[in-house]
Amino acid sequence: MFSEMNIVWAIVLLAGGLLILWKSADLLVAGAVALAERLGVSPLLIGLTVVAMGTSAPEVAASIAAAIRGEGDIAIGNVYGSNIANLALVGGLASLIRPLTIGRRTLRREIPVMLIVALLLWPVLQNSALSRVDGLILVAVFAALILLAVYLARKEATSSSRVPSTSLGAGVRDASSDTRNTRYATRNTEKDVLFIVIGLLGLAVGADLTVRGAKFIGEQIGLSNAVVGQTIVAIGTSLPELATCVVAAIKGHHDISIGNLVGSNIFNTLLVTGVAATVRPFAVGARLIGSDYWLMIGVSVAFGLIALAGRHTIRRTGGTLLVCGYIGYLVYLFGYKPRL
């Protein structure tokens, strides 16, 4: 009876967590789009930075906790699993709802950067361990990329906002209402930020409830810790990205969706891995340096190629391929037999 009650509560947590995720994602997308318009920057930048870092917070917590416990394979496995889930599962499902349009600049700049960042892990992992020095290097690279992204966005916004005034009268008339407009804009900016904060907090709570319920069900089924870590934990920590991208896709905000996916993967690879190693260095198993690593790289390359094949759009056919690829990845994980 007690076990049945636990299963019931696990299902309740799953359902309640998913409901909170959906509503929180709606608030986050609304606030992010409005804030981007108000600041005069691309929604892509907001997706790459604020939204991506916020939705990736569960990955940080999960990997740091695993590193502290000395479970290095779970820490790095969570990064791999989340990155694959972001592109194949989240990107695939979002494009099935509505084809995702990817800007030419994003396809030429941000997506290649995401792939290069993933390849940076290869030399770091060759000694089968991540040291504090390795972690600090990864964090420094992440900070440099964020600063560069903000610099380029501000430069582009400045160049596009240079509009000549039409007349002296117009300038005087605008000046008379400038104070009122400034106060109005400030109030609305505060509202946008509040929506983003509430949305991010709600995503964290919803993901935590969902993961708790899913982990208990997985343990009752008899799944191993490794499989739980790379499936339930990885998918669970990607739920904020999933909810955000699905809501953004429904509303047609493609830049938020793509920025969130690409930014989250960069965030996971550099900051999540770097912070976990900085907190406590850990060893990495041979599997995570070999087949699992190259699977992550393969999915990243496939994501870009599918976008190119669709002429800068991931259509429903491409989305189906991505989701099928993720199902194949799960089959591989559940069927993997380590060499003794």
Image: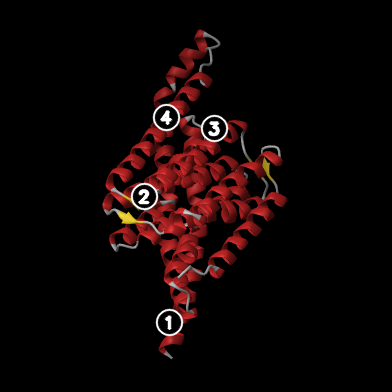
Question: Measured along the vertical axis of the image, is residue 7 above or below residue 99?
Answer: below
The quadrant of the picture occupied by the C terminus is bottom left
Horizontal relation, residue 154 to residue 112: left or right: left
Name the secondary structure under disc 2: loop
Task: Using the numbered discs, state the Cα–Cα distance from disc 4 to disc 3 in whole angstroms.
Answer: 12 Å
Q: Is residue 246 visible?
A: no
Task: Please tell me which of labels 1 and 3 falls first in the chain.
Answer: 1
| Residue 48 position (above or below residue 62) | above
Q: Which of label 4 and label 2 is nearer to you? A: 2
CB within 8 Å, label 1 to label 3: no
Q: Are marks 4 and 2 in contact (CB under 8 Å)?
A: no
Gap in angstroms between the C-alphas marked 2 and 3: 30 Å
**Of callouts 4 and 2, which one flags the residue occurring earlier in the amino acid sequence?**
2
Question: Which residue is at the far top?
Answer: 168
Give the Cα distance between marks 1 and 3. Answer: 48 Å
Circle 2 crowding by C-alpha within 10 Å: few under 14, some 14–19, many from 20 = few
The residue where tag 4 is placed is 148
Q: Which mark is residue 6?
A: 1
Amino acid type, label 3:
Arg
Residue 80 visible to an observer of this rendering = yes
> Alpha-carbon distance for marks 4 and 1?
49 Å
Residue drawn at (53%, 9%) of the image: 167
Q: Position of residue 53 (x, y in %)?
A: 42, 46
The amino acid marked with disc number 4 is Leu
Q: Is tag 4's residue or tag 1's residue first in the polypeptide sequence?
A: 1
Residue type marked 2: Asn
Mark 1 burial class by Cα count in 10 Å: few <14, some 14-19, many 20+: some
Label 2: which residue? 127
* 332 over 224 or under it: above or below: above
Q: Mark 1 belongs to which amino acid? A: Asn
Task: Please name the residue that numbered disc 3 is placed on.
Answer: 109
